[in-house]
Image (cartoon, rainbow, N blue to C red):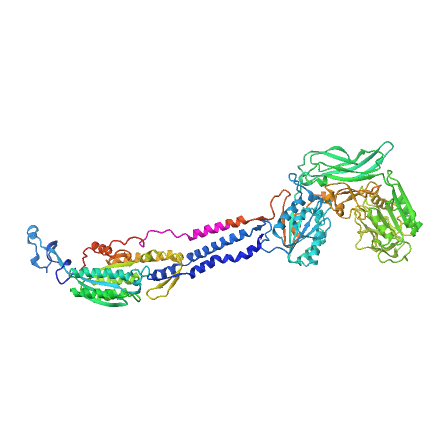
Amino acid sequence: MLGNVAGRHRSPVRGSSLEFAQYRKYVPGDDTRRLDWRAWGRSDRFYIKEFEADTNLRLCLIVDTSGSMAYAPEEGAASKLDFARKCAASLAFLAARQGDAVGFYAAGQGFHREVPPKRNAAHLRIILDELGAMQASGETGLADALHEAAERVPQRALIVVISDLFVQPNTLSSAFQHLRFRKHDVAVLHLLEDHELDFDFDRPTRFVDLEGGSPMLVDPSIIGPQYAKALQQYLTDIDGLVRDSGVDYHRVRIQEDYASVLARFLLNRTPKRVRR
Amino acid sequence: MSFQNLPWLLWTLPLLALPVVIHLINRYRHRTVKWAAMMFLLDAKRMTSGMARLRQIMILTMRTLAVAGLIFAVARPLASGWLGSAAGSAPDTVIILLDRSASMEQKNPQTGESKRTAALAKLSEFLGRANAATQLVLIESGGNIAREIDSVAALSALPETSATAGSADVPAMLQAALDYATDNQTGRTDIWLCSDLRANDWQAKSGRWEALRSAFAERETLRFYLLNYDEIAADNLAVSIDRVNRRESTDAVELTIDLRVTRAAQLEGQMPERQISLGFVINGSRSVHEVTLSEEQSEFLLQGYAIPIDASSREGWGSVELSNDANTLDNVMYFVFSEAALRKTTLVSDDPATTKPLSAAAGATADAAFEYQTEIVDSTAAGVASIDWDGSAMLIWQADVPEADSVVGRQLQDFVDAGKTLLFFPPQSANEAIVADPAFGLEWGQWREAADESGATISTWRRDSDLTADTQDGSALPFGEIRTYQWREYSLGSDPTILAKLASSGAAILSRSVNVSRADEGGVYVFGTLPQASHSNLARDGVVLFAMLHRALERGAESLAGGNLRTCAPDALPSSIAWQPVTTWGDAGMASTSEFGLLPGIFSDGDDEPQMIALNRALQEDSTTTVDEVELAMLFAGLDFESITLSVDDRRSLVSEIWRAFMIAMAVAMIAEALLCLPPAKKPTATTAQPRASKS
C-alpha cells in the first residue's frame, strides 16, 4: 500500500526496512548505496538489495445507494443497505483505528455524498454519520460513479465497493478497468439476498421495481426456470468480469453474519502488488 | 355417441371452464413484493416464450380434459362402434322395418336365437338405452303398416314381431315408412331396417326403388341403418311339396306325394353325402322314410311317393318334416288332402253357340284320375242362384258383369278368393246395362272386326307362365294359328297382365286381373273373343282352347282336390271365417288370429265337415340369393345409409357404455398434467453455491 507515512501496511515499493525482500540486478540510475558489496565480492556482479517497506493506507468506501439496495427479504428485516452500512462502518472503524485514511462515497446517480479520505480521529465520526444518514433511492449509476471515483481519488487507494451490482456486467467491466488503470486496489462486496438467488415464490406475484421501473405481474411457476437461467448467466458474466479485471470479489448473502463476512474478507485478502 | 344421463351432462358442462377460472382467480389473487432484481425478471420474461407458454396452455388443457373426462364418465356415455352418427341429439322418430320373412328364422343352433330375434334384441337394447324420448314406429313385413309403439321394451313380445313364413316386400315397407314420415311430418328420423337381404324380398330390380330413392332424397332428415344378417347357414335343408293326391284304386287307397329337398347352395362343391330322415305325418300318425343326398347333390326329388292310408280317410291333413337344422321353418311342409275332386265347370251364358265348344273342351277328360263335368246355367237371377259355387272349380261367365257390391258380385269375389278360376267371355250384345263399379273393374267396350277375312293374328303371348305358357316339353302352344274375326274391347281394372294380344290393333285378347290375392291358384281371366267360328277359330283349332281351359280348370281345382296348399300371406285365410289352428309351426297361441295367415300350419274353419287349409312358407324364401354390396349401395345411392353386418351369433351390442374410456382419459390427463407441472431438475449452480474465495 502506498502512503505518505510509514504504517502497518506493506508498501508496493521497496524501501528501507529490516525485512529483506529480494535481489535484483543493478541498472544504471539505481542508488549505489543499496548495492550489496558482498554479493559483488562473491559473484563479481552488481545486485541491488531490496527490503519490504511499510506504508499507511487510503481506504475509499463506495456504497451503492440505488433503490435496489433498499430490498429487504421481508417487512422490517435488514435491507441490503443496512448490511452495507454495517460492513462499511466496520471497515472504516478498523482502518481509522490503525491510522489509515478513510474516505466515503455514496453512489447513486453520481455521488450523493462524498467524504474524501483523511487520517484523523474526527474524520471517522463524520463518515459514520454519513453512513447512518444515507438512504437508498433512484436508479443505479454505479458504473458512472466508479468512473468518477477513478478520476477523483488522486492517489493509489484501496477502493471497496459495496453493492448488489444490478447493472449490466459490461458497463461494470470498463469501470473496474478504469480503477485498475489508476493503480487502485479494488475490492467488491457483492450483496445478494436468498429470494433473489432462489426465486422461491409459489404463486403469482406482482413485483414492484425498487428503482422506479414498471411493476410486473409474474407467475413464478412459468418464469422460474428462465429467471434462474438469466441469473446464472449474469453471475457467470460477473465471474468473468472480475477475473479479467483483477478485482477482489466477494459474493455475499445478506442473511449471513456481517462480522464473519468481514473476517473472511480480511483474512483471505493478501497484499496485492500493483504493477508499476 | 349419446348419453344416458344427458341432463347431468348439460348442467355440468360449464364446469369445464373451472380450471381456467381457477387459473384466472389465482392470477388475480397475487401478492405484491418490492423487488430489486428486476433485470432478471425482464430477461426471464423475454425468454419465456414458445415452449413455456405452450406448456402452460397444455397444463390448462390437461386440467380441462380431466374435468371433462369426469363429467362425461358420470353422464354415462353410450357408444356404437358402427353408428358413427354419434354426437347429435336423439332422433324425433325411429322407424323399425322388420323383415319377418321365413328366411329370418335361421337360428344359431347353440342359443336358439334367430336372425329376427337377434335383430330385435339388439334394437331393443340400443333404442331402450339411447333414444328414450323418441317416437317408435314399427313396420313389419307381415302387414307393411306403420304402428306406433309406446315402449321398446315390449318390442320382442309384440305379436307383430313374431315369426312368419311369408316373404317380405322391402320396397313396400320403405314406402310405408316414407308415407308415415310424410303424413306425420317427422323431424329427424332414423329408419332401422332388419333384414337378411334375400333377393326375392328386396326386389332390387323393381322400378319402385327409383321412386323411393327420389322421394327419400327430398327429405334430408332421414337416415337409414341396415342390420344386415346376410349370412347363409351352412348345409341347411329345406323341404317343399309339389303335389299331394289321394288316389283310390280297387284294392287300396293311398296318398301320392311329390316333394323335393334342397340343400343350401352356399356350400356347393364341398357338400358331403348325407342321410336324411323324411318324417311323414298323416292325420297325426308318423312314418319315416330315409333318403340319401349324394355328394355334391343340392336337390333331391321324391316323386310319387305313396303312403297307404285308411280307405275311410276321405280327407285329412299331414306334413313332411326334416330333422332340425339352422332354419326349422323350412324343415316342414303342411298339406291337406281329400277325395279326388270333381273338375266341375259351370258356364253362365245364354248363347249356345258359345257354351257348346266351351262345354265340350272343359268337359273333356284330360287326366283319367279325375272326373270332369260341366254345367250350363242361364244368366237370369234364377240361373245364377243355381250355381254350385262350392263344387265348381271354374266358372265361365258370358253375361253382364255384375256390380262389385252386389250379391252376385260378392259371390264372384268369394269364388276367386277361394282359389278358383273365373273366366269372362264377352257377351254378344253390346247393350248391357252400365254399372258404376263393375266386379273386378271389368268393363266391356265395342265389338271390333278384323280388317280382312283372314282374321287378326295373335302376335305376342306370354310363354313363360300362366294359361299361355309353353308345354312341358318346351314347345309353344300354336297361338300363331289362332285367327280372330271379331273381338270386343274391354278394360280390366288398372294395369292388368296381358297374356295375349292381337298383331294388328294390339288389343288384348286375353288378360288376367292382378287384383287377386292368391297368385298361385285360380284367378280372373278375360277373353276378348268367343270360340265360335264367327268370332275366332278357337273352337275349330281347339288345341289352344283345350289347353287354356284345362290349365284354368287345374288352377281352380287346386283349391278343391286335396289342394288348399297356400302360401303364408296376410290374407291367405279369408277373414270372414274364424279359423282354428289344427297344428302349426311354432306357438299359434302367441300369434293373433289376424296373423294366422302368416303362420305355417293346418287351419280349420271349425264346421262339422271342416274345410282345412294348409299354409306353408313362401318357397321363394328357400332361395339363398342375396343382394350384394354393390346393389345395396345402388339402392341407397344418395341417401344417408349405413349397413351394419351382423351374424346371428354376434354377441356384440349395438351400443355400449364407455364411461371407463373417459375415466382412463381423465387419469391420463391428470398424469400428463402432473408431469407438465414437475419443476425442472435443479442443477447445482453459482446461485446456490457459497460465495467463492476472494480473488486477490
- Give percent across and percent down for residue A37: 6, 54
Image-based side of B40 in relation to A158, left or right: right
Does any portion of residue B140 appear in the rendered image?
yes
- Give percent across and percent down for residue B695: 23, 55
Image-based side of B655 in relation to B459, left or right: left
Whether residue B678 appears in magenta in the rendering, the answer is yes
Q: Is residue B27 above or below residue B242?
A: below
Q: Which of these two is toward me, B131 or B245?
A: B131
Image-based side of A265 in relation to A197, left or right: left
Q: Residue at x 51, y 54 (%)?
A: B68
Q: Which of these two is toward me, A88 or B189?
A: A88
Whether residue B556 appears in magenta in the rendering, the answer is no
Does any portion of residue B240 appear in the rendered image?
no
The magenta segment? B665-687
- Give percent across and percent down for residue B410: 85, 51
Q: Residue at x 20, y 54 (%)?
A: A267
Q: Which corner quadrant holds the C terminus of chain B? A: bottom left
Q: Residue furthest right?
A: B352
